[in-house]
Amino acid sequence: MHTIVNSTSSAPARAAPVRLRVPNGRAVLLAMLPPLLGLAMLVLVWQLVSASNSNFPSPLVTWDAAVQLFADPFYSNGPNDQGIGWNILASLKRVALGFGLAAAVGIPLGFLIGRSRFLAGMCNPIVSLLRPVSPLAWLPIGLLVFKAANPAAIWAIFICSIWPMIINTAVGVQRVPQDYMNVARVLNLSEWKIFTKILLPSVLPYMLTGVRLAIGTAWLVIVAAEMLTGGVGIGFWVWDEWNNLNVPHILIAIVVIGVVGLVLEQALVALARAVTYEESGS
């Protein structure tokens, strides 16, 4: 008997080379065309409105005013006459303080509400009652308590941006699969281990959604609050330009407010994607 030997080589097959997909010019053009058409339509409507109303500045007039305005955005001629750059920074500082305080209180409170049925039953009516209250309704309370405009504006940001963090974090905790918690009990894990190994990775997407919603609310609130409290800030700057009947500057401020809000939201979206990707990779 002769033994049949397989002559096929046992060397591992080479992996196919990874090819990077580079978008061609046509794909890029198709992706950019809808937003460009939308912006063109907005400018066209703007031009038609300005043509029918002589008091409303045209896009070209507003553009010329923007060029002059941003030629020196950080000038300072006293506390009531500062460039738009200082006003934006002042508003961002208030937003950072109010938003940071809301995150420091709202996220832990959301975890506690999600973990405890008794605490959820106690806090849910309060959240449901206070969450729909208009941001400006909280401003007089802040002025009464703090006796100053700046902390009152920070208070309004805090109280209005805390609700999305509480609600989304609590919902995320409540939606953690019960099997995970049962395994934690069987393994006799400590509360800290349950939090770091089970709750936090599962709740993170919900928590970041609440943070993203809260930053949008905070930016909306500060503009409205500064119109009433005065001082330095983009909201007060808009109101001051209205008192001066400088409509081009008001339109510029609207665009700036929208751009800053978009940048803040997109930064948090990028952070959420990075954290989610890191969690899934680990």
Image (cartoon, rainbow, N blue to C red):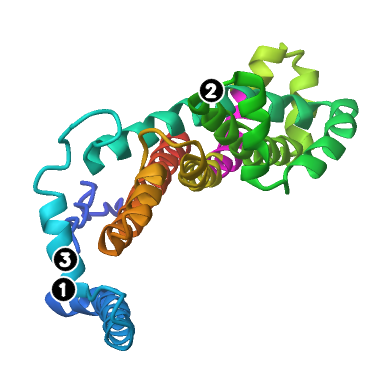
Cβ atoms at labels 1 and 2 below 8 Å apart: no
Residue 199 falls within the magenta-colored stretch: yes
Instruction: Please report the bounds of the magenta region as a residue range.
Output: 197-210
**Is 175 on the left-hand or right-hand side of 252?**
right
Q: Nearer the viewer, residue 128 or 190?
A: 128
Q: Locate residue 240, reporting x and y percent.
A: 36, 48
Q: Amino acid at mark 2?
A: Ala
Task: Count numbered badges in the picture.
Answer: 3
Residue 227 visible, this angle:
yes
**Is 85 on the left-hand or right-hand side of 226?**
left
Q: At x 28% / y 28%, what residue is drawn?
A: 79
Q: For mark 1, give the secondary structure.
A: helix
Q: Please tell me whether mark 1 or mark 2 is closer to you in this view.
A: 2
Q: Which mark, by number, is residue 63?
A: 3
Q: At x 63% / y 42%, what residue is drawn?
A: 164
Residue 146 falls within the magenta-colored stretch: no
Q: Which mark, by number, is residue 148?
A: 2
Q: Nearer the viewer, residue 111 or 72?
A: 72
Q: For mark 2, give the secondary structure.
A: loop
Q: Locate residue 91, reporting x and y percent.
A: 39, 36
Q: At x 15% / y 35%, what residue is drawn?
A: 75
Mark 3 to mark 1: distance in Å?
5 Å
Q: For mark 3, give the secondary structure.
A: helix
For the C terminus, the quadrant is: top left
**Is 95 on the left-hand or right-hand side of 24?**
right
Mark 1 to mark 2: distance in Å?
40 Å
